[in-house]
Image (spheres, rainbow, N blue to C red):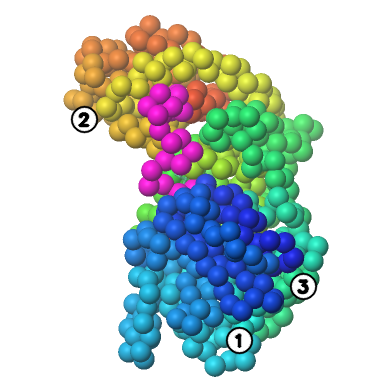
Amino acid sequence: MCGIVGYIGKRDVAPLLLEGLQRLEYRGYDSAGIVVTSPKAAGLKMVKAKGRVRDLEARVPKRFAGTTGIAHTRWATHGAPSDVNAHPHLDPENKVAVVHNGIVDNAAELRAKLEAEGVVFASETDTEVITHLIARSQADSLEEKVREALKHIEGTYGIAVMHADFNDRIVVARNGSPVVLGIGEKEMFVASDVAALVTHTRQVVTLDDGEMATLKADDFRTYTTSGASTNATPETVEWEAASYDMGGHDTYMHKEISEQPDAVDRVLRGRIDDRFSTVHLGGLNLDAREARSIRRIKILGCGTSYHAGLIGASLIEGMARIPADAEPASEFRYRNPVVDPDTLYIAVSQSGETYDVLAAVQELKRKGARVLGVVNVVGSAIAREADGGVYVHAGPEVCVVSTKCFTNTVVAFALLALHLGRIRDLSVTDGKRIIEGLRKLPGQIEEILKSEDEIEKLAAEYAGAQSMMFIGRVRGYPVALEASLKLKEISYIHAEAYPASELKHGPLALIEPALPTVAIVPDDDLLEKNRAALEEIKARSGRILAVAHQPQEKADHTIVVPKNEDELDPILMGIPLQLFAYHTALAMGRDIDKPRNLAKSVTVE
Ligand code: M6R
């Protein structure tokens, strides 16, 4: 949601910023805008457009030269998507330009106050109050003007500000919305996401909440909102520019599904300890004594990450015998939960930015809880806020729907479960067994990916359905939940997931030939129970597509996946259903990488 990109240096800034905005398109947006200037220019030049970055590009005039600029992709919160509501927002004198990610909670109150003082607003946005506050400040420097304005703001922001009277600099500030500086050779960049920076530099500074920065062409300075210097030093980002390319695939989703063998290999690399049949997780910050004293584990995440957390909870409970459960972070933080000092909380997030997860982490920390993060984006807000954690090392995920990150997150949970289990009561033999299973995963995923042609044919058969049911039992249930989410997100087919054990308690009423069921049927101790559910569906003339370790007699079709250890089977059983959702959506002509109404990072409530 919303993206910021900015540049100050010697290059022609507009093409650079437009390319940066394209790299942020995956986050989801509805309008875009750009403002530029240069040291010799008389003022600011701005273009905005509702729609895609290409619509903005088409409006940029031939004479739009500049060497300093900021640009934005907007996801509407206050005011509908429109040219005028797109960022940047300028003051009436065209001196101050602001782009903003986040939400100004007290915007209505500030707007009323400013209007009473005679300010005329051009847009319906919350952001415009920041522009007017900066423009009305009597302070001598741009930094001080921004600081004064921010004193009035309640809410979250990542902002970049330009001023016609201070056109040798861009001033940025962060509170709850990411701001990353890109440090170049006699040029500086700023963005809300490293994706917009890595083609130019891998030297970055991630601002903390309450931190500001001044960027000049050959210099940058970081300080707090109260003016104290923070002297931030650049770090090198591990993700390369090529990781953001499509790499010969037609969609990012297809690319990311195909990358899973390598991604899983990465999350395992360097972590397995054969000597003690365990794993090393360097960033956990939890010694053996502390690990032994945990009485309960609560996992929090949203969407796909919540589903990964459900599998994580069952892995932890199974291997470490610690009671564990998962809950949507968005629900947890609104029910005034009892925060127990003996409970370990784990926040799961691909982006590390999801507002509901971040807010839950902050609330837990405020109450003195210990919170770990299971996160993909290194240095992201949730990773920084947590007391320790495990990076899932899936590499950048660009498609709005999560695939490789889901798989890697579940593998990261398997590592955590093994680690905790081996500190507690998991035997060496079981530790070895799980390690062997983990090592088999990349090869087995390769094998599953080879069945893509077969899955594509099945998808074509089921693509006409109005609605689909997904069922699974115990370990299979979160797989069913995730597979149904994947299908609905990109095909827009209504899909619901139920525990197979609950069929008789209601959903069986829906079963008829027009409602196909996808059933997760692993070869484990529940095989016969799962088969009984298939019988029940067949007896009502329901069509069944099974994902199983062997062909299922009652199913109309079975996708056979390789068997691993029972605990690790859910990792493999989800993968053919990612391809199933993909090919169903493709057959229906959907915009797979950018499904309607969805954004990659949900940074607002
Ligand atoms: O970045 P996060 O993992 O915190 O994101 C959480 C959800 O918004 C995300 O998983 C969402 O459900 C995706 N669209 C799933 O495909």
User: Percent x, y for residue 397?
Assistant: 58, 42
For the point 72% across and 80% down, the residue is 229
- Residue corresponding to mark 2: 506
Q: In this picture, is 95 found above or below 517?
A: below
Q: Is residue 552 magenta?
A: no
Disc 3 crowd, CA 10 A, few/some/many (<14, 14-19, 20+): some
- Residue corresponding to mark 3: 219
The front one of 551 and 526 is 551
Main secondary structure found in the magenta portion: loop
Q: Label 3 is placed on what type of residue?
A: Asp
User: Percent x, y for residue 30?
Assistant: 42, 54
- Residue corresponding to mark 1: 144
Taking the image as shown, residue 570 lies to the left or right of residue 142, namely left
Taking the image as shown, residue 319 lies to the left or right of residue 464, namely right
Note whether residue 222 is visible. Answer: no
Q: In this picture, is 327 found above or below 369?
A: above
Q: Earlier in the sequence, mark 1 or mark 2?
A: 1
Q: Earlier in the sequence, mark 3 or mark 2?
A: 3
Region of the chain picked out in magenta, as a range? 580-603
For the point 47% across and 51% down, the residue is 55
For the point 58% across and 16% down, the residue is 450
Disc 2 crowd, CA 10 A, few/some/many (<14, 14-19, 20+): few
Dot 1: element: helix
Point out the frontmost of discs 3 and 2.
3
Structural distance between the alpha carbons of marks 1 and 2? 63 Å
The front one of 551 and 25 is 25
